[in-house]
Amino acid sequence: GCTGIWLKSEGGANVCVDFWCGTGKQSHGNPLMKTGHQMQRMAGVKKLQPNLRTTPFVLDPFAIRQIDAVLATHDHNDHI
């Protein structure tokens, strides 16, 4: 996530791809990942990564007045 793309056509159509406006996961009750979690398998770690937003908002989502299409590459919170 975190890599949103804004496309504007010559005709003025606004299309957002994976336009994530969230801040990420900020708190967890358990500081450890579930056994077999994807990141645990990939990185070999046990502590839960914070998944906080690390990039600034380039566009103010509240200033957007017209979107013609919103596309998400898959169903995760950091893609829409």
Image (cartoon, rainbow, N blue to C red):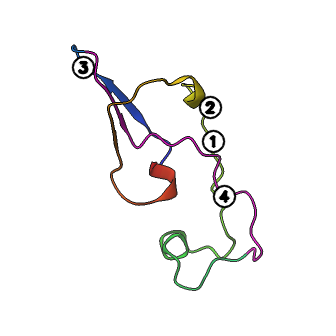
Q: Nearer the viewer, residue 2 or 49?
A: 2
Q: CA distance from mark 3 to mark 2?
A: 25 Å
Q: Is residue 19 magenta?
A: yes
Q: Nearer the viewer, mark 4 or mark 1?
A: 4
Which residues are the magenta region?
12-31
Where in the figure is residue 4, as x and y percent of width and height? 43, 37
Q: CA distance from mark 4 to mark 1?
A: 12 Å
The amino acid type of the residue labelled 2 equals Pro
Q: Residues within 10 Å of mark 2 (few under 14, many from 20)?
A: few
Q: Which residue is mark 2?
A: 56
Q: Is residue 47 left or right of residue 36?
A: right
Numbered disc total: 4
Q: Which residue is mark 4?
A: 25
Where in the figure is residue 64, as x and y percent of width and height? 50, 25
Q: Nearer the viewer, residue 10 or 34?
A: 10
Q: Which residue is mark 1?
A: 54
Q: Nearer the viewer, mark 4 or mark 3?
A: 3
Q: CA distance from mark 2 to mark 1?
A: 7 Å
* Residue at x 70% of width, y 77% of height: 32
Residue pushed farthest left?
Answer: 11
Question: In terms of sequence position, does the residue under pointer 3 or pointer 2 come before the other?
Answer: 3
Q: Is residue 61 left or right of residue 14?
A: right
* Residue at x 56% of width, y 40% of height: 21
Q: Residues within 10 Å of mark 4 (few under 14, many from 20)?
A: few
Q: Which mark is residue 9?
A: 3
The amino acid type of the residue labelled 3 equals Ser
Q: Is residue 25 left or right of residue 70?
A: right
Q: Are marks 4 and 1 in contact (CB under 8 Å)?
A: no
